Image (cartoon, rainbow, N blue to C red):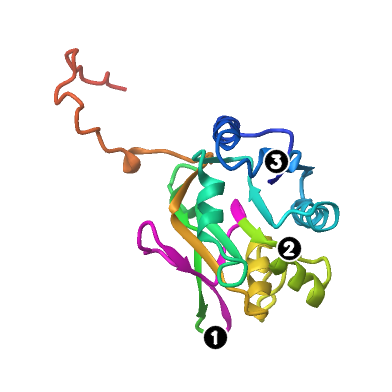
Amino acid sequence: MAYLHPHTVSHSWHESVMRLAAYDGINEGRILGTGGPLMVTCASGALVESRNLATRRWLDDTPHEWLWFIDTDMGFAPDTVDRLVDAADPAERPVIGALCFGAREMVADGMGGRRIRPVPTLYTPARDMQGQVGFTTRWHYPDNTLVQVAGTGAACLLIHRTAAEKIRAQYGDTWWDPVKYPDGRWVSEDLSFSWRLSLLQIPLFVHTGVKTTHHKAIWLGAEDYTPPPDAPQHAPMPEQEAPHA
C-alpha cells in the first residue's frame, strides 16, 4: 500500500483505511503483512516525484509482488484490495484500477462558479480534428465488469511488479513523468503512466464492480437539486411572500 499525503487527508479515507485494516486482519493479511504502507509526503507541485519515489521504494526496498496506490481523498470498501488482487493476473491483467470519478468543470454558472460534472476515469484512444492521438473519456461502461481501457487514474490502482520493471527497463525510473501530446500539450502523470503501459503492450483494466468515492469541493445550485422521493409535498410552515425591495 502506498499513498501520498499533503498533511491533510479526507475523513472518508481515514474511515476506509480503518475498516480495511480490520477486514484485512481477519482475512488475507495482504496489507498488514507488509510491515506498513509506503507513506510519501507530497508537497505542492511534487506529485510526479512523489509517485516515482513510492514506486522506486516498492521495487528496491521491498519484495512485494503488488503495489496498491490509494489517494488520500478517496473512500473505498474494506475488501477493495482483495477484490482487485483476485481479479488481477501477473501476465494478462497486471494493472487494474477501481471505478473512480473525477470532477470536471464544464461551463460558467453565471455567478462566479462553474458547473461540475462527475467523470468516470475510464479513457479510450481517440483522434482530434487535426488527427492527433490522445485520450478521451469513456462515458458508458458495464457494471461489475473488467473493462480494458487505454488509460485510467492512479487514485485506486493495483500494479504488478513486472509491469513497473518493464517500464523501468525501457524508460528508467520515469513511471509517472508527464509525456506530451503531439501538439505539445502535457498529459497528466497517471495518463502518462497509462501511455507507457500501452507503448509496452501491457494491458490495463478497470474493475467497474470495485467502487470508490472521491472527496471534492464543488459549487451547488438549483440545477443540482432534486427533492428526495420521501420529502413532504408541502412545507410544514406557511409560506410567505418575499418582502418588496
Which residue appears at 63% of the width and 68% of the height?
A: 194
Amino acid on which the number 3 mark rests in the picture: Gly
Q: Quadrant of residue 143?
A: bottom left
Residue toward you, 40 or 225? 40
Q: Pinpoint residue 158: horizontal percent, then vertical percent.
A: 61, 56
Look at mark 3 in the image and give the residue it sits on: 33
Which residue appears at 70% of the width and 74% of the height?
A: 180
Q: Is residue 134 left or right of residue 144?
A: right
Asked whether residue 137 is in view, the answer is no
Q: Which residues are magenta?
A: 130-157
Look at mark 1 in the image and give the residue it sits on: 130
Q: Pinpoint residue 191: horizontal percent, then vertical percent.
A: 63, 66
Give the spatial CA distance, label 2 vs label 1. 27 Å
* Mark carried by residue 154: none
**Crowding at mark 1 (Cα within 10 Å: few <14, some 14-19, many 20+):** few
Q: Residue furthest bottom?
A: 131
Which residue appears at 65% of the width and 60% of the height?
A: 159
Residue toward you, 48 or 240? 48
Q: Was residue 163 drawn as part of the magenta stretch in this picture?
A: no
7 relative to 188, above or below: above
40 relative to 145, above or below: above
Secondary element type, mark 2: loop
Look at mark 2 in the image and give the residue it sits on: 176
Amino acid on which the number 1 mark rests in the picture: Gln
Q: Pinpoint residue 228: horizontal percent, then vertical percent.
A: 24, 32
Amino acid on which the number 2 mark rests in the picture: Trp
Residue toward you, 6 or 107? 6
Single out the mark in the foreground, 3 or 1.
Answer: 3
